[in-house]
Image: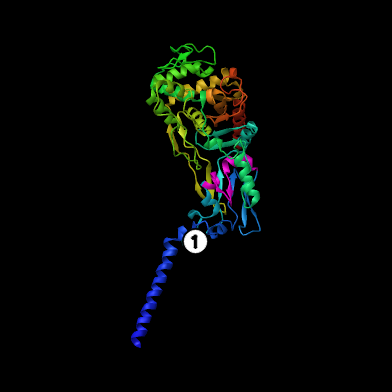
Amino acid sequence: MIRCIRRTSAFCLLMLVALLVNAARVQVFEADTLDDNPANRRQAIARYAQPRGDILIGDRSVTGSAATGRRLKYERTYTEGPLYAPVTGYASQTYGTTLLEHAEDAVLSGTDPALAPIPLWNELTRGREPGGDVVTTIRDAAQRAAYDGLGGRRGAVAAVEPSSGRILALVSTPSYDPGLISGTGRAVVDAWRRLNASASMPMLNRALRQTYPPGSAFKIVTAAAALDSGVVRDPDAPTDTPSPYVLPGTSTTLPDEAGGCERASLAEAIRVSCNTVMARLGVEVGLTGMVDAARGFGFNDDGLTVPSGVARSNFDERMSDDQLALSSIGQFDTAATPLQMALVASAVANGGDVRRPYLVERTTAADGSTVWRNRPRAYRRAMTPATAVRLRRMMVDVVENGTGTNAAIDGATVGGKTGTAQNGAGNSNKPYAWFISWAQAADSGRPAVAVAVVVEDAVADRADISGGGSAAPIARAVMEATLADRSGDG
């Protein structure tokens, strides 16, 4: 009898140990898998059980949280959603998160370990703190100027502070209201389908995630390569370039839209936007030199984040000389985001240095205490300081005497470069209008802002050369707003 009791007790103990081991396996080793299982509603219920932290422009919140009265207690709201959608993205109970709502989700949702009162607290308790806030680098005045300037046309604007890399404006139009897809239910599903079916693609972030042929705006990169390599030693000296120019190894001629490009100097080619001179200079620099120059500005970087991901701007690393000639004037396979082209202007304005662009100034806990603060960082070296000085003079000449006069601002020094990029098979579609620029106040020692504008459906006069009519006025409005805003801060 005693032997049977002992055997039964041993068996029960063995079963208890097995149960404990299994429980430990489930809770420790399979916890993440179970948490991420779509059938597990606890994660979603916990996620929306408290208000989400906010995204701020300056000291003003452009997001909020509203009580739903449902099981998912709070859903996201947006103030002036279309204006700030390219910055905030969306936080949807149905479709997840994008842009800053995604990149800073841990802070906004309260799960970031840095928000916890003591290290590892949230990991041990599997809890979350009240949502923290994200303070952006965006300037409201610049953002509004860009949005109003585009006027709903398909296009984008990116503006950065050259000395730091702070992103001051990030606009993509047509835009959308992220609040329409914040919750759940039939209305949200219908809004999602409608937005995704729209031919104007309002949910596409054209400033960060769409690349375009940059056209003549890319000639600043080619000019920097020509000067740094020594291919051009005197930017005011005539070049031995015919107009039209026969592309190397072909019988195809490249024409000029502007007059006076025959044997034009580099400075003149930038001022009036000569295709022939810049295409030939690109070939003379050579493929390796042009690839290195483009990389120096940020092209071919697959990993740039701001912290939202940025599409790769492309300059081909393998091509024939005729393709290199076209690439050197921003055509063929050359493609860039508006943010990338803002960095091109920024490099000239900042003495050749490109600062790493960033969109988040700092994050804070719910009580307002700073959790993390961003710092300006080096990104690339685009050109020597001497070359930057020469290019600044050329870009100023473009605005004062060339194709970019629509960007001039009284009392400020403005440099710019226009660009018209061919579009469609056989260039049958309307060209993309570009303008890149920078502005410096008269009483300042350094430029305050660098801007890139692209307008997809511009009604451009080809005699206007390179988007000076459609894109330059928008850039001017953004620069004026930034200079006025900084003056008010002072």
- Tell me the residue at 39%/72% (across/down): 17
Q: Is residue 95 magenta?
A: yes
In the image, farthest residue toward the bottom: 1
Q: Is residue 296 above or below residue 371?
A: above
Give the residue at the far left of this rendering: 3
Disc 1 residue crowd, few under 14, some 14–19, many 20+, Cα 10 Å: few
Q: Which residue is mark 1?
A: 126
Viewer-nearest residue: 366 or 470? 470
Against 472, residue 363 (above or below) is: below
Check disc 1 and give the amino acid type: Arg
User: Residue 298 falls in which quadrant of the image?
Assistant: top left
Q: Is residue 112 magenta?
A: no
Q: Position of residue 490 (x, y in %)?
A: 59, 36
Callout 1: SS: loop
Q: Position of residue 174 (x, y in %)?
A: 62, 36
Q: Can residue 55 be seen in this snapshot?
A: yes
Q: Position of residue 147 (x, y in %)?
A: 63, 35
Q: Nearer the viewer, residue 426 or 110?
A: 426
Q: Say which of 52 and 20 sits in front.
A: 20
The N terminus - image quarter: bottom left
Q: In the rendered structure, which segment of residues is drawn in magenta?
A: 80-102
Q: Is residue 490 visible?
A: no
* Left or right: 122 as drawn, with respect to 67: left
Residue 477: percent from left, percent from top: 62, 29
Q: Is residue 98 above or below residue 160?
A: below
The residue shown at (42%, 30%) is: 296
